Image (cartoon, rainbow, N blue to C red):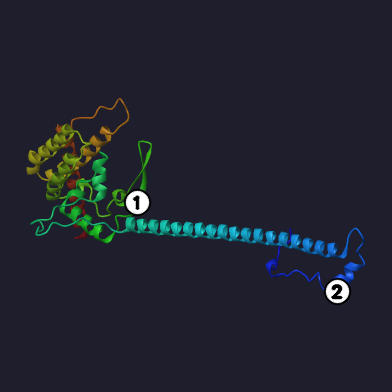
């Protein structure tokens, strides 16, 4: 049905009693259908058509009102959905910002700092200990811990690295996999560095649940035997002991983590005197050869 554009209530019934209508209706009048009947029929017909228009107008008005109501409800739902979506987006943004925001623990009021700062080895060294791997003693010396503190202040610990352990992919701090360029091999350490570093290494191993107590005790016995060995009183004896300690400790770790069932790890706490003596003799021979070479060069230069 075409849309009604004008309120039919504004329409008025034509004056069917007027002379003009009477003149037009007179030609249509008959004995059976008189002029008065025609006039009345015209009035009735107009009134009936007008009522239909009024009803159609009212229905159209009601449909328009319902359409407007539905439109308002749709708009309200859309506005509510947009509002909720905006609230959810804002909430997620706040949560993301909260995740990225640096976290700090509350401090204890009136608690003073410790009298001495505790040495803290590098994450790389602690990760090696945690994974039961060999790690240089240098990382637990004063120099190693000092380097770790400096690196920790100048680099971010937020960087992550993907690693694979026993077929599983794990995410850890990148610092735990970054060795120091200043690390010194065990055989190149001074005796003082070895003495201080081994204590830190044993302490770290004793606090790591993965290390069996008997292994830590055996390594402690090893360092004690090295420290008390009579070879320290001889020329280049400490150099030989450091070389022995470096080689043997690395071999011990390799055997402990070997997947070869035929490999039976040795007791590191038992010193192999023959091997130690051979290392000492090699060092003496090298020193002697170097002295001879320098003497020859000195004679030739005269």
Examine the rendered structure and indicate whether residue 45 appears above or below residue 217.
below
- Number of other residues with Cα within 10 Å of mark 1, as a class: few under 14, some 14 to 19, many 20 or more: some
Horizontally, residue 243 falls left or right of residue 94, namely left
Horizontally, residue 216 falls left or right of residue 171, namely left
Q: Considering depth in this image, is 195 or 30 the residue closer to the camera?
A: 30
Q: Kindly identify which numbered label has been placed on residue 160.
A: 1
Q: Considering depth in this image, is 44 or 241 the residue closer to the camera?
A: 44
Residue topped by disc 2: 20
Dividing the image into 4 quarters, which one contains the N terminus? bottom right
Q: Quadrant of residue 68?
A: bottom right
Give the structural element (helix, strand or loop) at label 2: helix
Q: Considering depth in this image, is 204 or 40 the residue closer to the camera?
A: 40
Q: Considering depth in this image, is 146 or 276 the residue closer to the camera?
A: 146
Q: Kindly identify which numbered label has been placed on residue 24.
A: none
Q: Residue furthest bottom?
A: 19
Q: Residue furthest front?
A: 31
Give the structural element (helix, strand or loop) at label 1: strand
Dot placed on the residue nearer the N-terminal end, 1 or 2: 2
Examine the rendered structure and indicate whether residue 218 appears above or below residue 69.
above
Q: Quadrant of residue 156?
A: bottom left
Dividing the image into 4 quarters, which one contains the C terminus? bottom left
- Number of other residues with Cα within 10 Å of mark 2, as a class: few under 14, some 14 to 19, many 20 or more: few
Residue 134 seen: no
Q: Nearer the viewer, mark 1 or mark 2?
A: 2
Q: Where is residue 94 shown, x and y percent of the image?
A: 36, 59
Q: CA distance from mark 1 to mark 2?
A: 101 Å
Q: Where is residue 9 shown, x and y percent of the image?
A: 68, 67
Residue at figure coordinates x 85%, y 71% from the top left: 21
């Amino acid at each position: 049905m075409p849309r009604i554009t004008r309120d039919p209530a504004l329409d008025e019934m034509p004056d069917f009693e007027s002379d003009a209508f009477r003149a037009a209706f007179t030609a249509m009048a008959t004995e059976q259908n008189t002029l008065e009947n025609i006039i009345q029929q015209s009035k009735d017909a107009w009134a009936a058509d007008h009522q239909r228009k009024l009803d159609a107008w009212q229905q159209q008005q009601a449909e328009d009102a319902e359409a407007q109501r539905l439109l308002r409800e749709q708009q309200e739902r859309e506005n509510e959905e947009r509002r909720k979506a905006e609230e959810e987006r804002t909430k997620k943004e706040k949560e993301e910002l909260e995740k990225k925001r640096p976290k700090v623990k509350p401090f204890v009021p009136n608690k003073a700092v410790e009298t001495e700062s505790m040495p803290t080895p590098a994450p790389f060294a602690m990760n090696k200990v945690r994974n039961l791997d060999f790690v240089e003693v240098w990382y637990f010396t004063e120099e190693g811990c000092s380097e770790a503190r400096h690196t920790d202040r100048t680099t971010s610990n937020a960087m992550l690295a993907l690693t694979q352990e026993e077929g599983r992919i794990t995410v850890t701090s990148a610092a735990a996999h970054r060795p120091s360029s200043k690390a010194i091999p065990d055989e190149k350490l001074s005796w003082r560095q070895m003495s201080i570093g081994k204590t830190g290494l044993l302490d770290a191993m004793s606090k790591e649940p993965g290390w069996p107590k008997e292994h830590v005790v055996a390594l402690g016995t090893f360092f004690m035997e090295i420290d008390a060995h009579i070879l320290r009183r001889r020329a280049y004896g400490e150099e030989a002991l450091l070389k022995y300690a470096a080689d043997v400790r690395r071999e011990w770790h390799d055997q402990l983590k070997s997947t070869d069932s035929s490999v039976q790890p040795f007791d590191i706490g038992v010193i192999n005197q023959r091997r130690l003596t051979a290392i000492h003799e090699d060092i003496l021979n090298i020193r002697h050869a170097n002295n001879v070479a320098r003497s020859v060069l000195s004679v030739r230069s005269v």
